Image: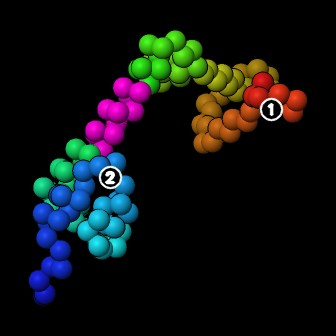
């Protein structure tokens, strides 16, 4: 088997600032997407650099959301609560299944489709 075309260090140096976008990493190294993905999966040091970059982006996103909440953005605050405290603030869906005589029976839900109705005049969800 031949010698690898790329070095692990090339990938580790290419990762910072990409936001964890594999095509960006590949472009910086000069390889295709699949090669970059292979190096991330195969080499623990590359995987760690990749995970660190992804975590940095996650932290940035959380800090942006928290800053919006601190600035009084009600929509963002509601979204945050629906994700962090869904029992109290999440969307509630109730389903009651029964036979024709009113006796309940077990129900297995395999798909839920939620559609928003749009007010044509204001172009907003109602």
Sequence-first disc among 2 and 1: 2
**Residue at image x 69%, y 23%?**
96
**With 17 as the anchor, is 125 left or right in this view?**
right
Q: Residues within 10 Å of mark 1 (few under 14, many from 20)?
A: few
User: Is residue 53 shown to the viewer in this render?
Assistant: yes
Which quadrant of the view contains residue 66? top left
**Residue at image x 12%, y 63%?**
9
**With 99 as the anchor, is 4 left or right in this view?**
left
Which quadrant of the view contains residue 108? top right
**Residue at image x 66%, y 22%?**
94
**With 103 as the anchor, is 51 left or right in this view?**
left
Residue 118 placement (x, y as % from top left): 80, 32
User: Is residue 82 shown to the viewer in this render?
Assistant: no
Q: Which residue is mark 2?
A: 18
Q: On screen, 62 above or below 7?
A: above
Q: On screen, 29 above or below 116?
A: below
In this rendering, the label closer to the viewer, 2 or 1: 2
Name the quarter where the N terminus is drawn: bottom left
- Main structural element of the magenta stretch: helix, strand or loop? helix
Q: Secondary structure at mark 2?
A: loop
Extreme residue in the right direction:
121
Q: Which residue is mark 1?
A: 123
Q: Which range of residues does the magenta coloring cover?
A: 54-64
Residue 17 placement (x, y as % from top left): 29, 49
Q: Nearer the viewer, residue 26 or 118?
A: 26
Q: On screen, 102 above or below 23?
A: above
Q: Nearer the viewer, residue 27 or 116?
A: 27
Residue 15 placement (x, y as % from top left): 25, 55
Residue 70 placement (x, y as % from top left): 44, 13
Does the magenta segment cover residue 17? no
Which quadrant of the view contains residue 27? bottom left
């Amino acid at each position: 088997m031949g010698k690898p075309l790329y070095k692990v260090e090339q990938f580790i140096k290419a990762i910072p600032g990409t936001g964890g976008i594999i095509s960006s990493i590949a472009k910086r190294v000069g390889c295709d997407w699949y090669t970059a993905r292979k190096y991330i999966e195969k080499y623990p040091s590359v995987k760690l650099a990749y995970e660190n970059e992804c975590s940095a982006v996650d932290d940035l996103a959380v800090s942006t959301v928290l800053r919006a909440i601190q600035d009084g953005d009600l929509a963002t605050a509601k979204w945050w609560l629906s994700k962090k405290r869904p029992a109290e603030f999440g969307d509630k869906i109730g389903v009651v299944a029964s036979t024709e005589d009113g006796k309940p029976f077990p129900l297995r839900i395999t798909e839920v489709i939620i559609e928003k109705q749009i007010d044509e005049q204001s172009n907003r969800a109602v």
